[in-house]
Image (cartoon, rainbow, N blue to C red):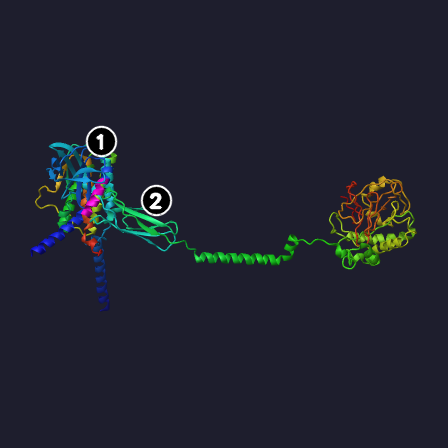
Amino acid sequence: MIQAGHKTVRKTVGLFAVLLMVLEWTRPGLSSPLRPICDLRVLDHFIKEAWDAEAAMRACKDACSIATNFTVPLTRVDFDVWEAMNIEEKAQEVQSGLHVLNEAIGSLQASNQTDVLQSHVDASISNIASIRQVLRSVSIPEYVPPASGGEDEETQKVSSISELFQVHSNFLRGKVRHLLASAPVCKQGVS
Amino acid sequence: MTKMRSNRLKIIFMLCLACVTTGGQHFESKVAQLLQDETEHIKCFVEGKDLTCFWEEEEERNHLHNQYTFTYSYENKNKMACAVSSLSLLASNKTIFFCKLAKTPFFTTLHVQVHRDGQKLYTRSLNAENFLFLDPPRNLTVLSSGKEGQLNVSWLPPQLKYMDDSMIYEVRYAAEGSDLGKVEVIKVSTMLVLLGLESDTRYKVWVRVKPDGVAYKGYWSAWTEPVFGVTPPSDVDPLIVLLVLSIGLILCLLSLTVILSHQKFLLKKLWPDIPTPEHKFPGLFTVYKGDFKEWMSHNNGSMWGRSVHVYTEELPSPLEVLSEVSLTSHDTSHREEVKPAEEDEEKESERSDSGLTDRWPDPPHAHWLMDQLRALQENPESHSQSSLLQSHDTYVTLNQGDIEQQADDVFEETLPLQTLFSSAGTPSLSISHSDLGSLQQSSGSGRLSSQSSLEYPNHTWPPKGPGYAYMAVADSGVSMDYSPMSSSRIAELGRHRIYTNDYKNEIFPHKWPLSGQYIKSG
């Protein structure tokens, strides 16, 4: 009797251990929440790098010319209109704009460009990814592609790399920064 | 009802007028500043959330504002018009035309144009977020922090949304009456502690603000009105005072301890005693009031008797008086006296007097010599021939007695004497005369107990074997007139040391180390 009881206990423990190992290995999609990054100086760092890229592209004219057009997001911020929007609308506007910008700058990675241009392209792509992480930390909704599949109205066309990086810096300074400043998670601790 | 409505309208009108006036003051000052600083034809700035662009009327032209049209466009959209207004600046007597955009788009490129009578006058492309012209900071206060040389400065940022964390401030301060001022730049924070100020001084402080240049850019605002603050007077830290006093007290105690422990030494060094001869002349100054003759007459006998004990510093040199008269009767006694004298002299190590090298010991035959001298003094006639004190020519030559015993005492220094006085004399005692050759000698003593100098008889000097000649002169204060004598052995008389010391004489360089007794010629 006793020996049978011991065997049962051993089996249970073994199964439990195996289960833990399997769960640890698979790690089902529950991730630990990120600590909210409400300090705007983090975003200011990326904005400064965008300024540098814009200034570098403005100086580089002939070497940085390209034939194709870029689809870029709109960067305009009307404060009256902006203040009237809710957080989801703002988030969608910012997330879709980041998506479009990422694709436009990313298209330059494939083309053979100068080392200076390539370094700024790589830095901008990396910064957009970091900004997405920052927005995720303050619980800003992720980008949802439009269901209609049509072209987004909140875009425009530019024909030069300098204009592309100008749009990039304007977008970060405007919409992205004001969205982060108005994030509900960041305002909870402020009286 | 009608009256109430009219009253309300009046109140609203007054409020609007106040707002416009306030804004107008800032607006005119900003326009005036940009008229000087901005080089573009179309000068634009953002005040609040609205962009204002203006341009200056051409000289000696009186255009009307309705002759101008102002248009703007962005993001490839159609041009939009803006109403043009005019303003006359009283300070500079200029007229400007301006347009204020109602809904200013930020973070996008604006293309503005000015037309007059259908003709394009000016054009410009700009981003509105880069031309912020903020109002000066509010509620500037300057307070004393209580600490020396410090002032606490604080203020409030201009009323503007979204930009509280994007502002940079500049604080300027100067002492009242001074043109030289310093500037401190501070980011985001709206307070500052000024350090390194002069104590008890009145300072003027100004502050201005500007966007930090990351998200927004713009011009420096106007300076605030100066605010005064007074620094506290300098205050000596009581702890420092206490420490300084404690250290001073400790140093004083230490120096006092050192002085007291070396009191005698320091006194001797700083205030040396003036040597007085009183102790050598007992009763001379106290009893006889300095009359030496009287003192001598009264203390003659006792002085001699006590000379051994009284004169502690000057060791009396025993004298052997060379006399013409044969002193064979005293020969043995001399020998006896000489031997112990030599033995004593060997024991001497140093002398205390300056100038002389050896310390003359207290010879055992000093008493005999004293007696001899006493006898001489008492009976000068009988000893006239042998009295050296009175005669130039008399001196006594003594041998050491046993030649064998004294053989070891003969040094090489005696050889010159032997060579000089080559004629061998037989007796231990011989008569010498002063007219014989003399070897000059002087002892290097600065303290002459006797001025005498002795002469050697050269040819009658029998320096054979251990024999040597020496002369003793007793000094009782009477000066002797002796011719210079060389290499004579001088024995002690009592405790006195008697030397021949004539500075004019030359000195024999060698010593005469006879039984440890030296005649130092220097």
Q: Is residue B176 magenta?
A: no
Which residue is label 1 attached to? A63
Label 2 vs label 1: CA separation? 49 Å
Q: In screen coordinates, is B312 left or right of A165?
A: right
Q: Are marks 2 and 1 in contact (CB under 8 Å)?
A: no
Q: Secondary structure at mark 1?
A: loop
Overall secondary structure of the magenta section: helix
Query: Which chain's residue wears label 1?
Result: A
* Residue B181: image tag: 2
Residue A180 seen from this side: yes
The N terminus of chain B lies in quadrant: bottom left
Residue extending furthest bottom? Answer: A1
Please state the horizontal and vertical placement of residue B203, each as a whole percent of the image. Answer: 34, 49
Task: Determine the image quadrant of residue B465.
Answer: top right
Of the pair A106 and B365, the residue shown nearer to us: B365
What's the amino acid at mark 2? Gly
Q: Is B23 one of the magenta-colored residues?
A: yes
Task: Pick whichever, A88 or B279, lies toward us.
Answer: B279
Q: Furthest residue to the left?
A: B1
Whether labels 2 and 1 share one chain: no
Closest to the observer, A158 or B10: B10
Residue drawn at x 79%, y 43% as measured from the top left: B502
Q: Report which quarter residue B93 is drawn in.
A: top left
Q: Residues within 10 Å of mark 1 (few under 14, many from 20)?
A: few
Q: Nearer the viewer, mark 2 or mark 1?
A: 2
Q: Which element type, helix, strand or loop, lies under badge 2?
A: loop
Q: Quadrant of residue B124?
A: top left
In magenta, the rendered stretch is B21-32
| Mark 2 crowd level (few <14, some 14–19, many ≥20, 10 Å Cα) | few
Q: Is residue B215 above or below residue B147?
A: above
